[in-house]
Image (cartoon, rainbow, N blue to C red):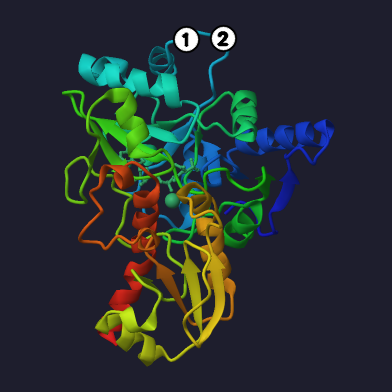
Amino acid sequence: MDSKNKAEIFDVTENASATERALAFEKACRVLQTGHLVGIPTETVYGLAGNAFDLNALTQIFQAKERPLFDPLICHIAEPEGKNIDILSQLDESGLIDNEKLTDAARQGIQALISVYWPGPLTLILPRGKRVHDLVTSGLDHVAIRMPAHPAAQELLKRCQFPLAAPSANRFGRISPTQAAAVFQELGDRISMILDGGQCQFGLESTVVRFRETGEPVVLRLGALPLSQIESIVGANAITASANEKLASPGTHHTHYAPRKPLLISDSLLPSELTEEQAATYHWLQKKIGILRFRAEPPQFESVHHSYTLSSLNGFREAAQNFFKTLRALDMAPVDVILAESPFAHLGISKTSGLNSENLRSGLGFALEDRLKRASSGYFKMSSSS
Ligand code: TXA
Ligand code: MG
């Protein structure tokens, strides 16, 4: 572990002076150069960063997060200086990827996405280069690469001059942090330094995409970049990988992003409309309920103690930004169970009818639903075994 002391938080937002920011980046670089870890802001969620070429730093990432070694890491890279730079060639030269292993069809799609969405919330799975350590890829022959857009992440990457391996800065399986204070809660006793870049703009992790040799894009993890925006560039229907597909991401576990409290998802927050199983659980618990809803409406349960609305405008973008922060707040609040509204409930769409509609498929609703389902699965296990 990095430090027995509590992590120090350094403000690198516009509230800090240019000198304070410069000193913070300098110190962060030193920490990273000596093989230690720094909590860093990105536009999606906060990351736990270490030098991707340093075995000691990589080992510390897995230890600090208590993450299993089969779950590979994303390498974050600096935006190149200058125009018309062939990023894939540059990545090849730096030993991160093996450009020659890409088929022309795949390369074409990848380049098209890079030119529009990098820097941004898109992670690409590319053939692994010779400098990439086994710990980064969990021994796979492909490596995940992302060019973050957050100015503080970019400033740090440019100063360090090495790629940063950075998973989300939460303990394994827990809620991803979207504020520096949340990183402190998760890892404050395990790392020495956190850069505070403010609230994350997107609030959900990057979308992870891999291309088949034939050039079809496969989405391995739904995320902040909606499917429709990928399809608008590559002109094909982006396929969402199912858990048992060979290409699927090893880290997309069924239970993930989970609060410590039991979480139950419902299409409706009306007590009369709960399913039998949900109602049984609700009575079994007979406890204080915290509500997570997507729209502003008065709570319907008598025992509701806390009710949080993710979006005042009923928009998925705003809901995504607030999602993990609110889940964390509910986890800390004096409630015993969290009842979450399905993201599609407020659109008046039942699960069986409208989910395939093009309109919904394109938005962030699916990424939100994915995170909610993973946050809740531990609960159902608990209720069926009790
Ligand atoms: O937005 C994000 O992506 C954030 C910020 C910090 O950049 N990072 C993040 O990292 O979410 P993490 O480690 O929590 O999730 C990485 C995901 C996992 O689902 C992992 O399985 C997948 O990316 N992944 C990483 N390397 C892979 C590879 N070589 N092949 C397939 N999937 C990979
Ligand atoms: Mg994560």
Residue pictured at 57% horizontal, 43% vertical: 201
Q: Quadrant of residue 271?
A: bottom left
Task: Name the quarter where the N terminus is drawn.
Answer: bottom right
Task: Tell me: residue 354, above or below residue 109.
Answer: below
Is residue 3 left or right of 108 when viewed as pictured?
Answer: right
Q: CA distance from mark 1 to mark 2?
A: 7 Å
Would you say residue 95 is visible in this rendering? no
Task: Tell me: residue 385, above or below residue 82.
Answer: below
Residue 85's mark? 1
Q: Position of residue 360 (x, y in %)?
A: 32, 47
In-front residue for pair 335/175: 335
Q: Are marks 1 and 2 in contact (CB under 8 Å)?
A: yes
Task: Provide the secondary structure element on which disc 1 rests.
Answer: loop
- The residue indicated by pointer 2 is 82
Task: Tell me: residue 131, above or below residue 135.
Answer: above
Residue 348's mark? none
Residue pictured at 26% horizontal, 24% vertical: 235
Q: Amino acid at mark 2?
A: Gly
Is residue 172 left or right of 137 when viewed as pictured?
Answer: right
Q: Quadrant of residue 14?
A: top right
